[in-house]
Amino acid sequence: MTIKITSDSTCDLSKELVAKYNIGIIPLYVVKDGVSLKDGLEITPEDIFAFTDSTGKLCTTAAVSQYDYTETFRPLSEQYDAVIHITISADFSSCYQNACAAAEEFPNVYVVDSRNLSTGHGHIVIEAAQLAEQGLAPEEICARLNDLTGRVEASFLLDRLDYMVKGGRCSSVVALGANLLRLKPCIEVVDNKMIVGKKYRGSYVKCMEHYVRDRLENCDDLLYDTIFITHTPVPQEILDTVHRTVRECGDFKHIYETNAGCTISCHCGEGTLGVLYLHKPKN
């Protein structure tokens, strides 16, 4: 049985991983100054940062339409025995709803809600591709993916809060206080929602080291197979610190560094980095 794995562009996987697993990417839309552009095809994170820096305005994101999903699924459903599409969390976007509506037109298209974003979503996509390579039936793959979604740990540490302020997710008073106290907030995905977790104080590089250790140390149920280090532009010192700290905290088989795509870039801006990994299944 031949199975095609597809994903929303929000999975933030590198071009190398997308090519390795032959993953089809369906772009969301980024709205810049009233114009809708396809994520990764017609606009990049660099374009977003340049626009915000020059105008003070934010770009916003919009879901993949049912029409776009239908037009993508139609030829794939004819070419493959089955198509499994993994979306960004239904709590963050209407992509899942639109994909399910489109999939109803095809008997061999399946849709899975990743219940996450960025490479938290990407973990589910990679697992889907690996299960497809093993020859499992699409129903079994979807069942395993639905189980896996609850074991993804996703969070990001932010160096700056101006994007969050402009987007209405953080008040200017709170941001001013955070800047004066040199606080760096950790944004976590908990129960399919983004919340503010621990706030770190000090230089960004020191905060980043403490953040990584807090996530990975003294945790006896980590799955030491794959971890993603996903980021918008950050200084090389930050990347070196994170890679070193990750290696010190656990013997991960695969450590992938990927660039955050347009969704994270629109909402969090530059100076954002996260470590995203999996927990072991509960007995």
Image (spheres, helix red, strand yellow):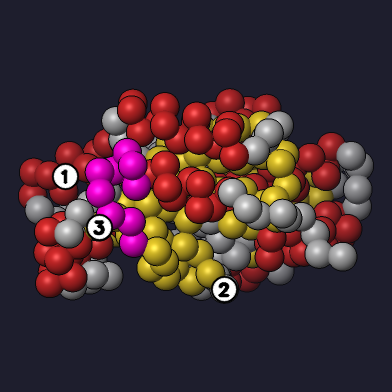
The image quadrant of residue 106 is bottom right
Mark 2 and mark 1 residues within 8 Å of each other at the beta carbon: no
Question: Which amino acid lies under the numbered mark 1 shown in the image of this protein?
Answer: Phe
In this view, which residue lies farthest toward the front? Answer: 218
Q: Which mark is residue 115?
A: none
- Give the residue number, with chain letter if any, for mark 1: 51
Tell me the CA gap for discs 1 and 3.
Answer: 26 Å
| Left or right of 181, for residue 144 | right
Residue at 54%, 52% in the rendered image: 215
Viewer-closest of 192 and 186: 186
- Give the residue number, with chain letter if any, for mark 2: 191
Classify mark 3: residues with Cα within 10 Å, few (<14), some (14-19) or many (20+).
Answer: many
Choose mark 2 or mark 3, whichever is in front.
3
Tell me the CA gap for discs 2 and 3.
Answer: 25 Å
Question: Which amino acid lies under the numbered mark 3 shown in the image of this protein?
Answer: Leu
Choose mark 1 or mark 3, whichever is in front.
3
Decide which of tag 2 and tag 1 comes sooner along the chain.
1
- The span picked out in magenta is 199-207
Residue at 62%, 70% in the rendered image: 101
Viewer-closest of 190 and 202: 202
Mark 2 and mark 3 residues within 8 Å of each other at the beta carbon: no
Decide which of tag 1 and tag 3 comes sooner along the chain.
1
Mark 1 and mark 3 residues within 8 Å of each other at the beta carbon: no
Classify mark 1: residues with Cα within 10 Å, few (<14), some (14-19) or many (20+).
Answer: some
- Residue 11 position, x and y percent, is 54, 48
